[in-house]
Image (tube, helix red, strand yellow):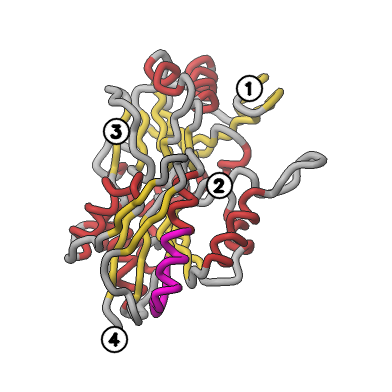
Amino acid sequence: MPDVKLFSGTKSYYLAEKIADYYGQPLGQVKLNRFSDGEIQPVIQESVRGTYTFFIQSTFSPSENLMELLLMIDAAKRASAGYITAVIPYFGYARQDRKDKPRVAIGAKLVANILQAAGVNRIMTMDFHADQIQGFFDIPVDHLQAEAIFIPYLETQDMSNVTFAAPDVGSTKRARAYAKYFSTDLVICDKERSRPNQIESITVIGEVKGKDVILTDDLADTAGTLCRAGQAMMDKGAKSVRAICTHPVLSGKAYENIENSVLDEVIVCDTIPLKQESPKIKVLSVSKLFARAIRNTHEHRSISALFVKQKSKTLFNS
């Protein structure tokens, strides 16, 4: 069986090191040359001929992270790598998944096209903003689910008085999965926006009085939705409000919004590094899950077994 080589982009090195540690081998060496005008040139400093090559890089802002990933993929393809997988824990531009108004780009589809043009054979990611983005690719996509991270953590908490809530209609499917697993009620927030990152109003659909509410979402950008939804829950008589959110984009006044909100805790994954510490933000690592997924890919074993929720205990107690 061909050897495995793991490489990291610059901004995801903190996570790639942990993935490589769980996998049981060191990261490969990549040197990043930079021209005086800022142009980058990644150089793979060891042979990848015929290997299963994995590049670990989330494509959060700035877009240079995506460009670095594309250049590493191209370098590996030209160096005769046997099979190239882009491990993208956070897939940027995923919010641009449809043409919802005239004369706008479908950014997620464009990024999918560019990755394939660069020569990638497989994509491994976690919690797309919209599940249908998998269909933008004509290559295999391993779409891991953060439930395998959050459920074991929640099972250590008191869940006797919990209600799960979707902070907007788009998060309903995700919230329903948690509610079904824990056999709890489901509440939905109907959110109206005037423009991106600007919420006009939130209407709570369902009963939350006296409940410990857990909001579920795939990402928090300015955290405006989470904070406004949390306040709406408290206004309806909720006992407490927490949130679980896969990708901590946390731009603008996000940290200030969270710290000044009614939210007791925001639990996130380390798909994106935090810009600063916050007493209200708890980080859970996805490194073990991705290490197992990489091993299963190399050994031609099932990936779906890793994110079937009923198996989460077996996965993370092993």
x 35%, y 44%: residue: 11
The residues bearing labels 4 and 1 have C-alpha atoms spaced at a distance of: 53 Å
SS under mark 1: strand
Question: Number of marks in the image?
Answer: 4
Whether residue 244 is visible, yes or no, is: yes
Q: Give the percent coordinates (x, y) of residue 43.
A: 35, 60
Among the two numbered marks 3 and 4 on one chain, the one whose residue lies closer to the N terminus = 4
- How packed mark 2 is, by other alpha carbons closer than 10 Å (few <14, some 14-19, many 20 or more), is many
Q: Which mark is residue 129?
A: 2
The image quadrant of residue 155 is top left
Q: Residues within 10 Å of mark 4 (few under 14, many from 20)?
A: few
Residue under circle 3? 282
- What is the magenta range? 71-85
Which three-letter amino acid code belongs to the residue tagged 4? Met
- 4 vs 1, front mark: 4
Asked if residue 214 is among those painted magenta in the image, a careful observer would answer no
Of residues 268 and 27, the one nearer the viewer is 27
Q: Quadrant of the N terminus?
A: bottom left
- Closer to the camera: disc 4 or disc 2? 4
